[in-house]
Amino acid sequence: MLLIAIVNYRSAGMVADLLDTLADEVRGLGGVRVRVGDNGSGDDSVARLRAHVQARGYQDFAEILDLGHNGGFAFGNNRLIEGPLSAPADARPRYVLLLNPDTLVRPGAIRALLEFMQARPEAGLAGSRLIDPDGSVQVSAFRFQGLFSELDDGLRLGLVSRLLSRWKVTAPQPLDRPTRCDWVAGASLIVRREVFERIGLMDEAYFLYFEEEDFIKRAADAGFSCWYVPDSIVVHLVGQTSGVTNKQDQNRRKPKFWFETRQRYFVRHHGAFKSFWIDALHLSAFLLWRLRRRLQGKPDTDPERYAGDLLRHNLLASRRLAPARIPRLPS
């Protein structure tokens, strides 16, 4: 049995399109439920989505829930999955698939993930090959972020990047076979039930961004492996619901919560002392890149005020974290 969870925030049209791409495969597989939760959109999203489900006859597999308020991506997913995962043992889903609202599922994508998980019992989590609408492959398999990856990301110098290649966040993405990696993008992420039973649900202290890397890092620390499954193909309309990673607006200033969740991730997994030096090194490297970019006349593709915001919200900010909010399933 598979549970598919989709969190909506003012993106009812995209979610309706996503449901249309899911319908045939969900019915063909059997034993699949789709739960869509509205994260306090404050518009007519719930009514529109319920009307779409009714008009298309999707009531046999889909339900639309009003979650009441916008508690963030982790909050929304947790509310959708905690009930089914806490049901009597014979009614609990074996797998949970987290899908972004700005995705479109290609035929066979869900089956490919399920078949992979069934064939690899050691795999705790797996992600799809994400593509642009024109078929271009997006980077969606990664290494965990740390000191050297942040140096490389800030400096962007060929020689240094080659020396630090083993720590580079973007991992090799072969298209012909499943590949183990540190973590995958959460736009299409399947999770074995036992992962939630062992480590709990997602940390609701993350509002948006870094929550999937944190969750997968916790799973890795508990002994679960993560895989990239290229036979599962999902179109990802990058950042259409948040604007933070929209490719058409690369210079948009990152919101404060992006830096706050980044801070949370690094302090939690590297400690306060090391995370300070990670920030200091990243900022120094980024400022050197900005100088080199100007001298070489290269185009400016960096977010507005990134250096100042990084200094204010990360380097000089308190490293005392708010307590984690990780719901646990009943034993």
Image: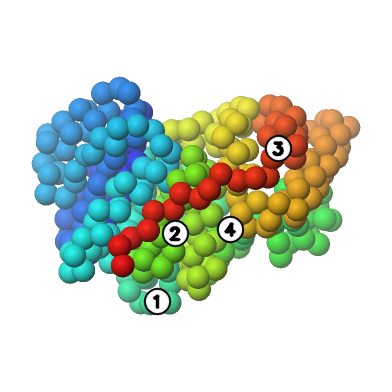
User: In which quadrant of the rendered image does the N terminus lie?
Assistant: bottom left
Q: Residues within 10 Å of mark 4 (few under 14, many from 20)?
A: many
Q: Is residue 94 visible?
A: yes
Label 1–label 2 contact, CB within 8 A: no
Residue annotated with mark 4: 142
- Give the spatial CA distance, label 3 vs label 2: 33 Å
- Residue at the extreme right: 295
Q: Earlier in the sequence, mark 1 or mark 4?
A: 1
Residue 151 marker? none
Spatial CA distance of label 4 from label 3 is: 27 Å
Q: Please state the horizontal and vertical placement of residue 320, each as a whole percent of the image.
A: 65, 45
Give the number of callouts: 4
The residue nearer to you, when weighing 298 against 45, is 45
Q: Nearer the viewer, residue 135 or 241?
A: 241
Q: Which residue is under mark 1?
A: 120
* Residue 152 seen from this side: no
